[in-house]
Image: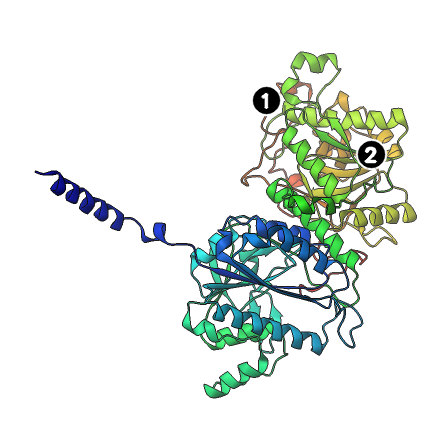
Amino acid sequence: MNKQVIFGLFLACLLVCISGQDEEDYQEPPTVLVALLVRNKAHILPMFLSYLEQQDYPKERIAFWLRCDHSNDDSIQLLRQWLDNSGDLYHSVNYEFKPEEQSFVNESSPYEWPASRFKHLIALKEEAFQYGRDIWADFVFFLDADVLLTSKDSLTVLTRLQLPIVAPMLISESLYSNFWGGMSEDYYYRRTDEYKEIYHVKKQGSFPVPMVHTAVLVNMNHRAVRNLTFDRNKLVEMQKSRQQEPLYDGPADDIIVFAIWANSSGIPLHICNDIIFGYILQPLEPGDTLDHDIQQLVNLKSIMVNDLGAVPPLLDYFKHLEKKPEKSKLSLDHIFMINLKRRPERREKMERLFDEIGIEAEHFPAVDGKELTTDRLLEMGVRFLPGYEDPYHHRAMTMGEIGCFLSHYNIWVMMVRKQLKEVLILEDDIRFEPYFRHNAVRILNQARNVAEYDLIYFGRKRLKEESEPTVTNADNLVHAGYSYWTLGYVITLQGALKLLAAKPLDKLIPVDEFLPLMFDRHPNKTWTEAFPKRNLIAFSASPLLLYPIYYTGENGYISDTEDSLQISVDTSEGGEARLKSDREQVFDHELDFKLNPELKLGESLSKSHQEL
C-alpha cells in the first residue's frame, strides 16, 4: 500500500473522529447583550461591576447596552472608570450618560416612582430590546445594579438552559427574591407554598413562575420572544389583535406588563435555583434613605460570609472604595467569641463576620474536650450531678460538653475578676440576623429601662411549649422558658455571680441545661432540687437575633460537644436518669421561633414590611 493511500486513510479516519465529537465542542458560546440601567448606585457599583467582570464567560461574546441618567451621586464617574479599565475586554459597549439630569419632575425622593419615571424606564428597556434584535444577540440579559452575581458560572448556567425566559434566583436578607410564586387577578403579588420551596431550595432546578424581574435572561432565538414588550399600550394592541379577553387594565409597570405579555403569548417564565447565583437588594420606599440601602448591603455581606466563606473581592481599581462599618461593642463592656484552637476556620469566618457587621469582639480560647481526661477533671475538682442522663441520647456527659461548660464558666470567672458589668458571649457557629447591631442595642436598652436582669438570650432553641410572658413595658423581650443552646447571650456581673455561687463544678451538667435550672424553668424536678437557689432573672429577645449556621443532620453540621468521648460516671450515689419519655420531659423540641426576616433598620422589631 503506497504512502498516498495510507495518508488518505488517515485523513478519512481523522474526519470520522472529528465528526463523532460533540458538536458543542466546536461551537462558540452564544452572544449575550447585557442591558444595564443605572441610577444612584455608586454605593454598590464597585461590587456589581467587579462580580460581573469575574464571570467565567468569554468577554468577546458579551456586549453592553448601558445608560445612566437622573443620578446625583458618583455613578457616572464609576462607570467611566470601569469603561476606561475594562471596556475594551468586551465585544462592544453602547453607552450614554446624562450627568445634567439629576431627578425627575415632581419627584420628592430618588426612591419614588412617578409616572414620568416609569415612562422613561419603559422607553429605555424597549430601546435596549430593539438594540439586541439589531445586533442579532442570542440573549439579552436585563440586569439591575442591585444584583450581585457572585457565582462566576451564572451566565454559563443560564445560557445552557436554552429557556425562552429565565432568571437566576437571587438571595436577599429575607424571603424577598426576583420572582413571584403567584399573581392575583388584579396583578398583585401572591405568595405560595411553592415560592418558599424554591427559595429555600427544597426542590432544585428551573420552575415556571408568573413573574421574574431584576435579572432576566431572554433567549432571542425563540421566535415568539422577539416581539415581547414592556409597553402597556403595545400589550393591549396585541391582545386586541388576538381577540384576547379581558384586556390588560393594570398599572403601566414594566415588569408586570412584560410578565403578562409572556403569559398571554404562551411563553413560560422560569426561575432557576441550580446554584447560588448571587444576591439582591430590596427596593427602597419613598421615605427611605441611602442609609437603608447601605445597611441592606451590610446584611448581604454577612449572608455572603455564611454562604461563601467570605465576601468576594473587588477589582483592583475599585478596592480603595471598599468600606466596612466602624466596630462597636453594642454599648456593652465586652464581647467574647468562644472558639477551639483546632477550629481556626471557624474563628476566621467569625472574624470576617465581625468585620462586615462591625462588631468588636475578643477571641476567647475554648476548653477542648479532646484534651480533657478523667484525672484532669478530678484535679480540677469537677464532679457530676448524680443521675444525669442526656434526655435525647440517654447517655452521660461527653468531654465536649464538659469543655463547653468550662469555656463559659471561665468567662463568668473573668467577668467577676475584671468587674465587667455586661458581656455578650458568642459561640463560633452562628449567623447574625439582619440589622443585628441596631436590634441588639435596642433590646439592651429595653432591658435596662424596664427591669433588672441577669441574662438575655440572643439565640436559643425553645424547647417546651409553654407560656413566655412579655416583659412589662418591653416590646421585644419575653421571660425565657426552658431553652437549649448557648449560641449567644448577654450576662450581667450580677448574673455571673449567681451562676458561680451555685458551684456548678460540684454537680456538673451541660451548660444549656444549667442555665434554665438557674432561672427555675427546667422541667426535671430531680435536677432542679440540686440547685436550691434558682433566682437568675432571664429574658429572651423576641424575635431572636442569632441562629446556628447548621442544624443537626444538615450537610456541614459538626458538633464538637456531642461527637466526643463520654465520661464514665458512677450513678450509685442516687437519682435515676430522667428519660425522654418522662412526662416532665415531653416537649416539642423542633419548635424554633425565628426572627421576622422582613425588618428594616429603625423599625419596631415587631413590625414587618411587605416583600415588594
Q: Residues within 10 Å of mark 2 (few under 14, many from 20)?
A: some
Which residue is found at the position 41% from the left and 72% from the top?
223
Answer with the quarter of the image where residue 501 lies.
Answer: top right
Image quarter hosting the C terminus: bottom right
Q: Secondary structure at mark 1?
A: loop
Q: Nearer the viewer, residue 158 or 178?
A: 158
- Picture coordinates of residue 595, whole percent (x, y): 71, 51
Task: Describe residue 47's horizontal placement relative to residue 414 as left or right.
Answer: left
For marks 1 and 2, give the CA distance: 30 Å
Note whether 200 is above or below 100 in the view shown: above
- Picture coordinates of residue 487, whole percent (x, y): 71, 38
Q: Secondary structure at mark 2?
A: loop
Q: Amino acid at mark 2?
A: Arg
Task: Describe residue 239's horizontal placement relative to residue 546 as left or right.
Answer: left
Task: Describe residue 51's horizontal placement relative to residue 327 as left or right.
Answer: left
Q: Nearer the viewer, residue 317 or 183?
A: 317
Which residue is found at the position 15% from the left and 43% from the top?
9
In the rendering, which numbered label is found on residue 565? 1
Q: Nearer the viewer, residue 122 or 414?
A: 122
Q: Amino acid at mark 1?
A: Leu
Q: Nearer the viewer, residue 445 or 187?
A: 187
- Picture coordinates of residue 113, whole percent (x, y): 72, 72
Q: Do labels 1 and 2 touch, CB within 8 Å?
A: no
Q: Earlier in the sequence, mark 1 or mark 2?
A: 2
Task: Return the residue at label 2.
Answer: 534
Answer with the quarter of the image where residue 393 lies.
Answer: top right
Circle 1 or circle 2, nearest the eye: 1
- Picture coordinates of residue 606, whole percent (x, y): 77, 58
In the rendering, which numbered label is found on residue 269? none
Which residue is found at the position 59% from the left and 71% from the top?
125
Number of marks drawn: 2
- Residue 243 seen in the figure: no
